[in-house]
Amino acid sequence: MQYFNNRIIEHKSNIIETWKITNELLNKCKKFTNITFLKDRNVGIQGKKEIPNAMNIYFRSVIEDLAGKIDESANSLLGGDYTVNLSKFKFPLL
């Protein structure tokens, strides 16, 4: 325990390093999951290109939905013609 105390004191001005030490102490490691299969509308999706493409399409639709809601709110509150620039959220399909 003294080891961790010394490391936290040593890095007390560096919040990122302090959190790394805290997570190490709590045995919280970064975990990676290898996704080999997805199901979208009862259709199975497999493959190194198909899975990221399906995720890209899904998250893009979430962003577009949120952007539409933001546009509606901004226009009603500010009385203008505001739109979210979705071009920053376009990721090429593999």
Image (cartoon, grey):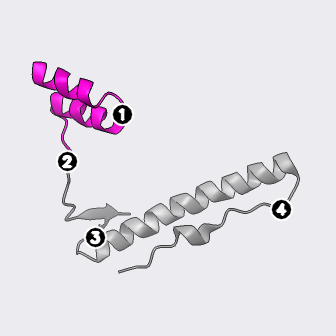
Disc 2 from disc 3: Cα separation: 23 Å
Which comes before the other along the chain, label 1 or label 2?
A: 1
Quickly name the residue at label 1: 15
Which comes before the other along the chain, label 2 or label 4?
A: 2
Counting from the top left corner in percent of width and height, residue 76 is at: 83, 49
Counting from the top left corner in percent of width and height, residue 43 is at: 32, 68
Quarter of image, res 48: bottom left
Disc 2 from disc 4: Cα separation: 43 Å
Quarter of image, res 42: bottom left
Discs 2, 4 touching: Cβ within 8 Å: no
Q: Which residue is drawn at 61% across and 68% down?
A: 86
What residue range appears in magenta?
A: 1-30
The amino acid type of the residue labelled 3 equals: Ile
Helix, strand or loop status at disc 3: strand
Q: Which of the image's four quarters has the N terminus?
A: top left
Residue 72, relative to residue 28: is it above or below? below
Quickly name the residue at label 4: 81
